[in-house]
Image: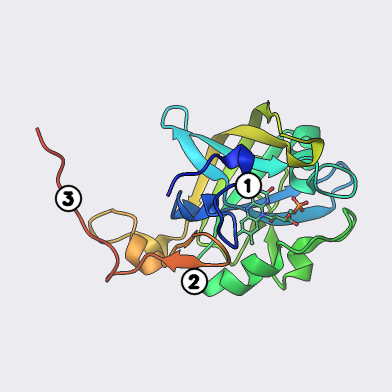
Amino acid sequence: MFYEPKKKNHGLPKNPFNSLIVPRPIGWISSADKEGVHNLAPYSFFNAVSYSPPTVMLSGGVGSAADGMKDSIRNIEATGEFVCNLATWDTREQMNRSSMSVPADVDEISLSSLTAISSSIVGAPRIQEAPVHLECRYLKSVDIPGWTEVDAYRVIFGEVVGIHIDDDFITDEGLVDVAKLLVIGRLGYNDYTRVDKDSLFTMDRPG
Ligand SMILES: Cc1cc2nc3c(=O)[nH]c(=O)nc-3n(C[C@H](O)[C@H](O)[C@H](O)COP(=O)(O)O)c2cc1C
């Protein structure tokens, strides 16, 4: 089949786009507003974009919420700081719950039955239940124009300035034990995948 996204002529019951770029890592983003109210939400338009300095991006809709902006995006731009928490099998239900659309003054960390702990460098909180935290400083925003105002997205770039890894997930050889972390990734629709010892394989690079 072939279709042109703008014409929406795929003829399928659901937009297939999100099922074609898979699996996507989930940036489970904690932030705080200027008054210190905590916010937490998953973003699968999320990735690492460079090594040195380590830099990440997330992309959030800016036209769909009632006030036109996701709380995470607003908080990051207002405070200049955020944390990416690693979403794993053990916290999958809390991760999903934290995607609920609630008013900006609701603490979504408590709402998701999770524990906020202080970061080492940034003011944004970390999620104690997550085994990895990337403390980030906001770098810049790039607007992705939508076909309509409701479609518009904003990409946030942040430099990772501090990294916490639970020592239980470092092997005796000094490697991150990805199979033990049981990281989850986003597929299309409401589907997810899990990295474990059966799904992981290794290939040496040629040359
Ligand atoms: C696994 C998952 C991934 C998501 N990825 C995104 C995303 O990349 N961009 C986005 O705008 N919303 C995404 N959402 C929806 C947001 O999490 C949801 O709108 C949330 O309420 C935003 O919270 P905030 O306003 O506190 O930032 C995702 C939801 C789930 C469950």
Percent of width and height locating residue 24:
48, 52
* Residue type at tag 1: Val
| Classed neighbour count for the residue bearing mark 3: other residues with Cα under 10 Å, few (<14), some (14–19), many (≥20) | few
What residue sits right under mark 3 in the picture? 203
What residue sits right under mark 2 in the picture? 89
Q: Circle 3 sits in a helix, a strand or a loop, which is it?
A: loop
94 vs 134, nearest the viewer? 94
Q: CA distance from mark 1 to mark 3?
A: 31 Å
What residue sits right under mark 1 in the picture? 83
* Residue type at tag 2: Trp
* Residue 94 seen by the camera: yes
Percent of width and height locating residue 95:
63, 65
Position of residue 107 in the picture relative to residue 30 (left or right): right
Circle nearer the viewer, 1 or 3: 3
| Classed neighbour count for the residue bearing mark 2: other residues with Cα under 10 Å, few (<14), some (14–19), many (≥20) | some
* Residue 58 seen by the camera: no
99 vs 182, nearest the viewer? 99
Q: First in sequence: mark 1 or mark 3?
A: 1
Q: First in sequence: mark 2 or mark 1?
A: 1
* Residue type at tag 3: Met
